Image (tube, grey):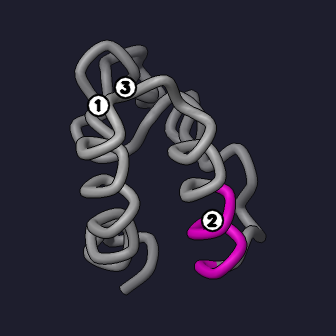
Amino acid sequence: MPLEGHQGTEVNGTLSNDYCEMCYRDGQFIEPKITFNEMKTRGITGLKQSNKNILVKQLMIWGYPFQLKNLDRWK
């Protein structure tokens, strides 16, 4: 997901450049035990329910797992 306007926060209150507000707050993951597959399923479900243009939506659904696996959290 694009982070701009949806960034999570670090401990000092600054915006995260890596994680969104739905998974990261005050320097901690909101759901620290969620698995990669659970996160992937949740993200794809959210994208499918979004009101984005169908072509943009399909591209985001296709690219989401690749973007997700490149985050430090899942390495």
Which numbered disc, 2 or 1, marks the residue that appears first in the sequence?
Answer: 1
Q: Are marks 1 and 3 in contact (CB under 8 Å)?
A: yes
Give the residue type that dot 3 points to: Gln
Which numbered disc, 2 or 3, marks the residue that appears first in the sequence?
Answer: 3
Q: Is residue 55 above or below residue 14?
A: below
**Chief SS of the magenta region:** helix
* Element class at badge 1: loop
Instruction: Give the x, y percent position of residue 72.
Output: 32, 71
For image coordinates 44% across by 70% down, the residue present is 73
Q: In terms of image quadrants, where is residue 4?
A: top left
Give the residue type that dot 2 points to: Met
CA–CA distance between discs 1 and 3? 5 Å
For image coordinates 36% across by 78% down, the residue present is 69
- Whether residue 47 sits left or right of residue 57 in the image: it is right
Q: Is residue 71 above or below residue 11?
A: below
* Element class at badge 2: helix
- Whether residue 35 sits left or right of residue 64 in the image: it is right
Mark 1 surroundings: few (<14), some (14-19) or many (≥20) residues within 10 A: some
Q: Find residue 7 and name its label.
A: 3
Instruction: Give the x, y percent position of residue 29.
Output: 61, 49
Total marks drawn? 3
Give the residue type that dot 1 points to: Leu
CA–CA distance between discs 2 and 3? 17 Å
- Considering every residue shown, the one lying at the far bottom of the view is 75
Q: Which residue is mark 1?
A: 3
Q: Which residue is mark 2?
A: 39
Range of the magenta residues?
36-42
